[in-house]
Image: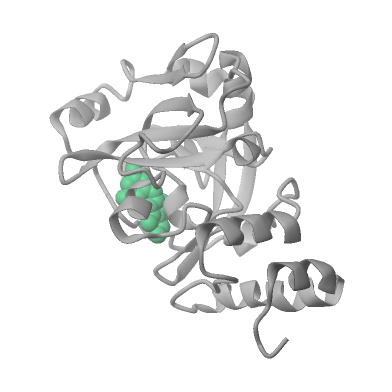
Amino acid sequence: MSGIITRRAVLTTGALGAGALLSGCDKFQNGAATRPILFAGEQINYGLARALTNRDSLAKEYRPDQMSPLFRVNGTANPNTPTYNAMVAEKFANWRLKVGGLVNRPLDISHQQLLAMPARTQITRHDCVEGWSAIGKWHGPMLGTILKAADVRTTARYVVFTCADLYSGHNYYESIDLIDAFHPQTILAWAMNDAILSVAHGAPIRLRVERQLGYKNAKYVMQIDAVDSLSKIGKGKGGYWEDAIDYDWYAGI
Ligand SMILES: Nc1nc2c(c(=O)[nH]1)N[C@H]1C(S)=C(S)[C@@H](COP(=O)(O)O)O[C@H]1N2
Ligand SMILES: [Mo]
């Protein structure tokens, strides 16, 4: 094959080939500055990741004694807008999570309601594309529970998260597909490391999508919309960093 690996070759190489390729992922936690890229090009990367890994499988969960003593804050540390500051002052008593788009039952969920929902606790590793990782404990309802309550229409393919923080006047946004949205470890975390989620880490709720890189884990989530296409979201690549500096939309690890 003279060094060129075709998609077909990879898919037919079997366990050995897949294992050799995926072993590159282990290097990430040793502090490599960039994650290993299997192939350039969004479509083939996404297709390959889906073909080579079982996206329904669970991300590794850790023991409490493995939690990082310090979990870095990255990106926005405080949205610091008048609206957000007012919500912090009220301890999010008047905050609402809006769920809309392609759903049959749009939702408007209060912080109290969210905290009363059945929740999951998971200790996982967060990998930032800038080359650091941290293990933390997250607690909150499964996103799938909320999407089921909203009754997502069959035409929907993605969910888009709109956040309270602004980058050059535009809200941070991210999106994932419905496979990741309904994954059991995909939660809307309202607590971290056994404490109510801090402003620095995304209060009142932040997405945990454990099979994907840090930037997909949207903090300060205000609104969730089910959509059939990402083309009209931002500049069309499905997320703030994807649009701004060409990060991969599918950031599976
Ligand atoms: N709303 C919002 N979400 C965000 C970001 C951000 O700037 N704004 N940064 C992302 C990046 S790059 C990372 S690594 C993580 C950092 O989360 P942390 O501050 O809890 O470590 O949040 C992600 N989600
Ligand atoms: Mo990041």
Does residue 141 show up?
no
Identify whether 66 is placed above or below 216.
Answer: below
Q: Position of residue 46 (x, y in %)?
A: 60, 56
Q: How does the figure colour the protein chain or chains?
A: one colour
Q: How many numbered marks, from 0 up?
A: 0
Answer left or right for 118 relative to 200.
Answer: right
Quarter-wise, where is residue 63 in the image?
bottom right
Identify whether 88 is placed above or below 18.
Answer: above
Quarter-wise, where is residue 28 in the image?
bottom right
Quarter of the figure that contains the N terminus: bottom right
Quadrant hosting ligand 2 = bottom left
Does residue 223 show up?
yes
Q: Residue at x 64, y 35 (%)?
A: 120
Answer left or right for 137 relative to 132.
Answer: right
Q: Position of residue 213 (x, y in %)?
A: 50, 57
Q: Position of residue 32 (x, y in %)?
A: 49, 79
Identify whether 140 is placed above or below 115.
Answer: below
Q: Residue at x 47, y 13 (%)?
A: 107
Quarter of the figure that contains the C terminus: bottom right
Front residue of this view, candidates 42 and 15: 42
Front residue of this view, candidates 155 and 160: 155
Identify whether 2 is placed above or below 189.
Answer: below
Q: Residue at x 69, y 73 (%)?
A: 6
Q: Position of residue 27 (x, y in %)?
A: 60, 78
Answer left or right for 108 relative to 139.
Answer: left
Q: Residue furthest bottom?
A: 2
Q: Residue at x 14, y 29 (%)?
A: 82
